[in-house]
């Protein structure tokens, strides 16, 4: 247990403008000291000196939200040679029973290491962080494009007859190009003028979002090729899926085993038996973006990979449902991709 390896645990409850620290004795769980620091380089230095003063010995940091509000502090501490672990949020029912307070949350984060609860290493690596940001921006561009396309088609359904007849039947690419070039005319009625302006605005928004997503994807592909080019050789794994795999996995040692990776991805089997029925289902927890990436690969292989289709057919013949067969495939895929990631020369 971690309590046998360290003398102190420094729990950190993180926020946007302030972090709350609590030093806990590993052997007893007693609270030694608490304080708050600002989320600035100066505040991080104060946190480090505070721990050095009150936890002078073998210590570990348990930081809530090490990938979000606590990212700056985690990077600073790692740069100082400190051991940093990522603590999960305390369960909602626990907060309801014992109250919600920043100081209490910091103590809970520290004591979580002493109760045998598994903590993860924070994500690391400059390219991994670059990929995370690029994926975030691309996801936003894709969402904008999708919503604008829905709005465009909705406007066409209700726009004046002459304009609707002009645009109906066009492919998506030709439709966007045609709407983007629409011009206002004094001969049009007020509703036609409004529809023309809206269609042109939406079409230009779609074009801009499409170009933005393509530019971001090209940058993502360059980072993936530099970090883990072998992922792109896997059937169904494109640059976006590969990038998400790298971001969630991060680096060697963060995820201790392929079973832990499957749990992180939400594809570890969970017993769901009742009465005379014995079955398992997929976990609904974990990293949902990673789960979505695995699901995308499975969808591709179900359409294009004969071995995958044969496997599903065999499982269905054995009495499994297609959903159960997909669950088994996701678990296998998580195991396989974890091994591929561990073989790649990914640096932190």
Image (cartoon, helix red, strand yellow):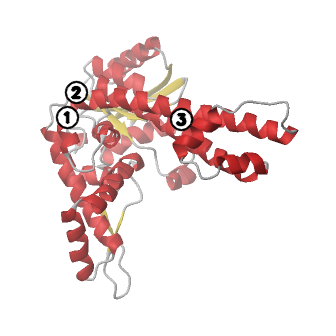
Residue marked by disc 2: 226
The location of residue 203, given as percent across then percent down, is 62, 36
Which residue in the protein does label 3 denote? 102
Instruction: Tell me whether the residue at label 2 lies in contact with that at label 1, contact meaning CB atoms closer than 8 angstroms.
Output: yes
Query: Of residues 71 and 44, which is closer to you in this image?
Result: 71
| Disc 3 from disc 1: Cα separation | 43 Å
Q: Nearer the viewer, residue 117 or 343?
A: 343
Drawn side of residue 191 relative to residue 256, left or right? right
Q: Check disc 1 and report the residue beneath it.
A: 229
Q: Residue furthest bottom?
A: 276
Alpha carbon distance from label 2 to label 1: 7 Å
Q: Which mark is residue 160?
A: none
- Which of the two discs, 2 and 3, sits closer to the camera? 2
On the rendered image, what quadrant is the N terminus found in? top left
Say which of 341 and 5 sits in front: 341
* Disc 2, SS: helix
Secondary structure found at label 3: helix
Q: Residue furthest top?
A: 42
The part of the image, by quadrant, that contains residue 267 is bottom left
Residue at image x 41%, y 55%?
Answer: 285
Q: Earlier in the sequence, mark 2 or mark 3?
A: 3
Which quadrant would residue 130 be assigned to in this image? top left
Asked if residue 239 can be seen in this view, the reply is yes
Residue drawn at 50 percent across, 53 percent down: 94
């Amino acid at each position: 247990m971690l309590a046998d390896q360290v003398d102190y645990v420094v729990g950190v409850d993180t926020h946007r403008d302030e972090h709350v620290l609590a030093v806990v004795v590993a052997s007893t769980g007693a609270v030694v000291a608490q304080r708050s620091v600002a989320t600035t380089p100066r505040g991080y230095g104060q946190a480090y000196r505070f721990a050095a003063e009150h936890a002078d010995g073998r210590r570990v940091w348990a930081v809530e939200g090490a990938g979000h509000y606590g990212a700056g502090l985690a990077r600073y501490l790692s740069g100082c040679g400190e051991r940093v672990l990522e603590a999960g949020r305390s369960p909602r029912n626990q907060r309801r029973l014992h109250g919600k307070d920043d100081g209490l949350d910091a103590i809970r984060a520290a004591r979580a290491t002493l109760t045998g609860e598994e903590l993860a290493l924070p994500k690391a690596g400059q390219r991994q962080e670059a990929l995370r940001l690029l994926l975030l921006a691309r996801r936003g561009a894709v969402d904008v494009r999708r919503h604008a396309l829905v709005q465009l088609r909705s406007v066409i359904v209700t726009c004046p007859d002459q304009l609707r007849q002009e645009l109906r039947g066009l492919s998506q690419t030709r439709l966007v190009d045609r709407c983007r070039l629409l011009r206002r005319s004094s001969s049009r009625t007020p509703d036609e003028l409004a529809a023309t302006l809206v269609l042109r605005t939406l079409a230009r928004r779609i074009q801009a979002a499409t170009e933005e997503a393509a530019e971001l994807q090209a940058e993502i592909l360059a980072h993936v090729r530099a970090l883990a080019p072998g992922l792109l050789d896997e059937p169904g794994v494109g640059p976006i899926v590969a990038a998400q795999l790298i971001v969630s996995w991060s680096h060697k040692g963060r995820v201790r085993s392929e079973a832990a990776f499957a749990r992180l991805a939400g594809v570890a089997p969970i017993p769901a038996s009742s009465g005379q029925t014995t079955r398992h289902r997929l976990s609904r927890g974990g990293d949902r973006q990673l789960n979505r990436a695995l699901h995308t690969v499975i969808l591709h292989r179900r359409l294009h990979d004969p071995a995958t289709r044969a496997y599903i057919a065999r499982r269905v013949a054995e009495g499994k449902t297609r959903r159960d067969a997909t669950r088994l495939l996701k678990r296998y895929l998580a195991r396989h991709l974890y091994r591929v990631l561990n073989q790649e020369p990914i640096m932190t």
